[in-house]
Amino acid sequence: MLTVVFLVRAESGDKRASTRAQKEISAPPITILDQNGQPDVNGVPSAVGTIVDVEVGPGGGFTFNPSTVNVSVGDTVRWTWDSNGHSVTSGQPCQADSQYCSPNDMNCASGILSNSGTVYTHTFAQAGTYSYFCAAHCFFGMTGVVNVSGGCAPSGWSAGPSLPTVLVRSVGVWFPADGNFYSMGGRTSDLAGSDFQHVLRYSPSSNTWTQMGVTLPDNQMNNMACGVLSTGGTPSIYCVGGSAAGQTTATARVFSYNPATDTATTLTSGDNWPGDAAGTILPGGFVAVNDKLYILGGFNINVASTNQIWQFDPTQAVGSKWLQRVNTPEGIMYAPTCAINGIIYVGGASDYSGGTVIDTTNSFSFNPTTNTTGAIAAIPRATGETRALNFNSKMLVIGGGRVAPNPSNEVDAYDPGTNTWAVNSPVPAFTNARRNFPTDTDGTTRIWLAGGYEPSAPA
């Protein structure tokens, strides 16, 4: 049940001083990358932390200047208002996520507007990509991005503290609003009654696990589909479906968990997942993209894989949150799935054949905008019962599989730009082969994984 963390070195020891942003010109922007292919830091060297300046509404326009800045963990962005009636509000355009906001990081969803001469600063403590917008003018394209590179930790996998309990079949979720990694549900063994109705939180800043106080709604905690979605500017972790240890039935219920308040809310039965109308179907692959949760395929327990795709939108009315899309090319279950630039990719998947769960190389893409699937190169090895992660715009399939020689500790990386796979590059194999374990990533510098069957016994 050891926690394993992957870190990417960001060569940012050459800290940068404040430089006043210059007016943008019509020439194409130049992107400077470090030796790891990551955006280099704005500014000039200094012995102290970075302060990077951004103008808000220069010349009365609806822009931030510059609209994209690159800093390191621990550095500060300073926004100065050049005109009236603007805000700096974190989140995707017009969707506040309450990570930071002017004038004082409070009441972010309300979009408080400030006037010329206002100065607002925010120091970034976690690596990642942080989007923001003006609450009054986001529909006019007044948006910006802060790219935060990691600190000076070495690249590679490293051991973290053990989970508080043996745990399998839980779902790992990185929560951008607080920078923590959460494990949702699962079970502590394969025996009936071992279902874990709790949330575990790993804090990268303190390198510790904490069992949260909430008790999740029911004992159907195994093999759920979970992802971060926002409603009314408040991000929560939504979880769909699941089953209890030793059962051959499955639930269709949906609940949300708010890490900020440590509370869980079960949605009305009118919002149950239609893909489990039979009461025996577990979710297949899943991913959250553009504030919607997608479930691809599923497992009709001890019968067959399924091929439906369902879209969940938490902002819609009761009874209207689910939308069925095109079917997958073949039945898939326990499928490694992630989204890159709005396109959903599947690399490998389990199937049910001859009365047993097997691994496959089934691989394809799904475009939610056009509601179409497409062919991609097949993953080099058969796998399933694991997750795929979007890490620096590559799909990483993290170990998994159950048929010998699986489970594996291999990391297969798919590049959508070249339609090719690489093995254990740019991320190397991790310690201890496993399957059915919680894992997730911040997308740019860190991957977390813990627990699972290691290789066949719960760990």
Image (tube, grey):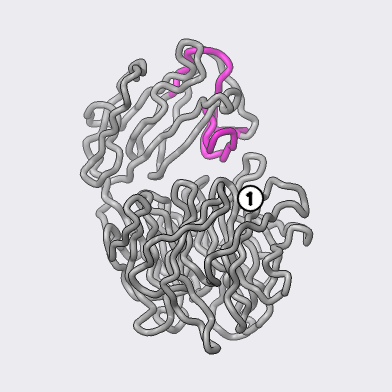
**Farthest-out residue, bottom:** 354
Residue 82 colored magenta?
yes
Residue 303 figure quarter? bottom right
Query: What amino acid does circle 1 point to?
Result: Thr
- Residue at the image position 49 percent from the left and 29 percent from the top: 143
Of 258 and 244, the residue lying toward us: 244
Q: Is 166 contained in the magenta span?
A: no
Query: Which residue is depicted at the point 41% across and 83% down?
Result: 403
Please report the residue visible at 31 percent of the width from the left and 68 percent of the height from the top. 430
Residue 169 image offset from top left, x and y in percent: 53, 73
Query: Does residue 39 appear in this view?
Result: yes
Instruction: Give the labeled residue for mark 1.
Output: 261
Number of numbered discs visible in the structure rendering: 1
Quadrant of the drawing holding the N terminus: bottom left
Q: Quadrant of residue 46?
A: top left
| Image position of 380 (left or right of 297) | left
**7 versus 199 height, above or below:** above
Is 279 or 65 nearer to us in this picture? Answer: 279
Q: Return the x and y of residue 219 as percentages of the image width and height.
A: 67, 73
Residue shown at the point (23%, 43%) measured from the top left: 11
Label 1, secondary structure: give it: loop
- Dividing the picture into quadrants, the one containing residue 426 is bottom left
Image coordinates for residue 323, horizontal then vertical, percent: 68, 55
Q: Nearer the viewer, residue 209 or 417?
A: 417
Query: What range is drawn magenta here?
Result: 79-108
From the viewer's side, name the closer residue of 137 and 329. Answer: 329
Residue 459 shows in the view: no
Q: Looking at the picture, how far across and down is residue 197, in whole percent?
A: 63, 69
Q: Residue furthest top?
A: 59
| Image quarter in which the C terminus is found | bottom left
**Label 1 crowd (10 A; few <14 / some 14-19 / many >=20):** few
